[in-house]
Each structure stands twice: as C-alpha cells, then as structure tokens.
Image (spheres, rainbow, N blue to C red):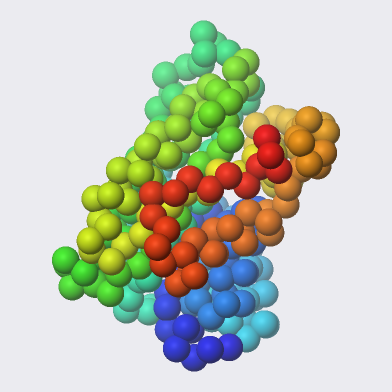
Amino acid sequence: MNAAAGQKTLLVTGASRGIGAATALLAASQGWRVAVNYASNEAAANAVVKSISDAGGEAFAVKGDVGSEEDILAMFEAVDARYGRLDGLVNNAGVVDQAARVDEMSNARLERMMRINIIGSFLCAREAVRRMSTAKGGRGGAIVNLSSAAATLGAPGMYVDYAASKGAIETFTVGLAREVATEGIRVNAVTPGIIETDIHASGGAPDRAKVLGAMVPMKRPGTADEVAEAIVWLLSDAASYTTGAILNVTGGR
C-alpha cells in the first residue's frame, strides 16, 4: 500500500452495507483511511472495518444518523480526533420507503425522506467543505453524492418522494461543485440504476432488482462493487478535471 496515499482520509456515510460498504472496502484497498459510518448496525460496520484491517488497510467505525445534525457534528468530530484531516466524503446514506402513491403519503414519511436524503447530505457536505476548502485552510478534497436513476424516471406509483429527493441531490451536486471549484474541492454524483442491495428489502420489495434486471438494456442488475468503482474513481486524482458531473451507472437504463 502506498504510504503517502494512505494518509488521505475518507468518510463514507451508510457504509455498513451495500454500496457504502463496497466503496469503503475499495477505497481502503487504494490507500484511503476510511471512517465507516453506520446508523444502527454496529456489527455490520465492524465487519467492514475488520475486512479492511485484515487486508492491511486502516479504518474505524463511527456511529451517526445523518437525519440528525447533532449526530453529524459528532461524526465529523470523531474523524477529526482520529485522523486530524478529511480529504473525501461519500454521501451514501439514504432511505427509501414502502411503495405508495403520492396521495397516500403522510407528512411524517415525507419529512423523514427529505431530512435524511437531502438535508443530511447538505449538512455532511457543509462539514466537509469547512474542513477541506483551501479558502478555510484546508488541503482540498472530493465529495461524491449518491443519486438514483429514479431522479430521472420519477418512480411513479412507488416512491416519487425518494425520486424527488434524489433529483434534489443532482441539483445540489452541480451547484456546490461550482461554488467550491476554486477552493480545491471537486463535487460529483453517481447515479446507480437497478443494483442488488438491501435497500430494496427496506422498501418492501426484496426481489425488485432481479425482477427489473431483465428490463435493463444490459439485461441484469448491477452490483454494489460496480457502483463503488465509479465512486472511487471520482474521488481519485484520475478525475482531477471532473466536477459537477452526474455519472450514470445504470446498465443503459
């Protein structure tokens, strides 16, 4: 492992499973020190940390619900205390809900969706910029936000609220990228399509990826590892002239 690259620190939210875990593992293999954020599943987060450690990398688990500003502040402070620097953020944590029409959605559902998926990403990015911006004494860095193909497709009859939250993330990505472009920070988004992860079970449709995979031009669902490859590339110096990009990882969907 490259010792110099190993000094860079990455925070991945929602990294105990799925795309977040795959991203943490891949980034660690490429020399990043990784803060593995989780909201409730400590055992799963510790398993990711162990996998990284066993492979010779460096990581630690940090609890925090991105739906809570207090938790977000504590999470970033934990990274400060552990590593003393931040070079990358992956805004991966997010929620979906049971399939429903808009005229069936409660205010509580909508507030939870937007608080976690949008406000949480804004607050995490705010804290990252405060640490990474060269205008604030930082070294620069990279932020990658997680969107979804639902942002374009709308997810009618299923979760228009989730789709709308991800549409907001894409607009946020473009705006923030331009805002901090002269401060050494690149901001991009990855837009996964139908990916085999646990989020489908959270939405009450555990077989959704397999069922819909046949509708994708590539005739299969994607994997968390395939999405992680795109995320880690955007974090890397290989993407040094890429900012404000929305990169589709959708199998052509």
Q: Position of residue 164 (x, y in %)?
A: 46, 27
Residue 124 visible in rendering: no
Q: Position of residue 130 (x, y in %)?
A: 23, 62
**Residue lying at the far top of the rendered structure:** 103
- Front position in the image: 37 or 137: 137
- Front position in the image: 128 or 236: 236
- Identify the image quadrant of the C terminus: top right
224 to the left or right of 39: right
Residue 152 visible in rendering: yes
How many numbered marks, from 0 up?
0
Residue at the spot x=47%, y=35% of the render? 166
Residue at the spot x=37%, y=37% of the render? 171
- Front position in the image: 66 or 158: 158
In the image, residue 88 sits, relative to residue 70, either above or below, namely below
**Residue lying at the far bottom of the rendered structure:** 3
- Front position in the image: 94 or 180: 180
Q: Position of residue 81 (x, y in %)?
A: 33, 76
In the image, residue 210 sits, relative to residue 27, either above or below, namely above
Residue at the spot x=83%, y=33% of the render? 214
- Identify the image quadrant of the N terminus: bottom right
241 to the left or right of 236: left
Residue at the spot x=54%, y=58% of the render? 231
In the image, residue 100 sits, relative to residue 217, either above or below, namely above
Asked where in the image residue 183 lies, by quadrant, the reply is bottom left
Q: Position of residue 202 (x, y in %)?
A: 65, 37
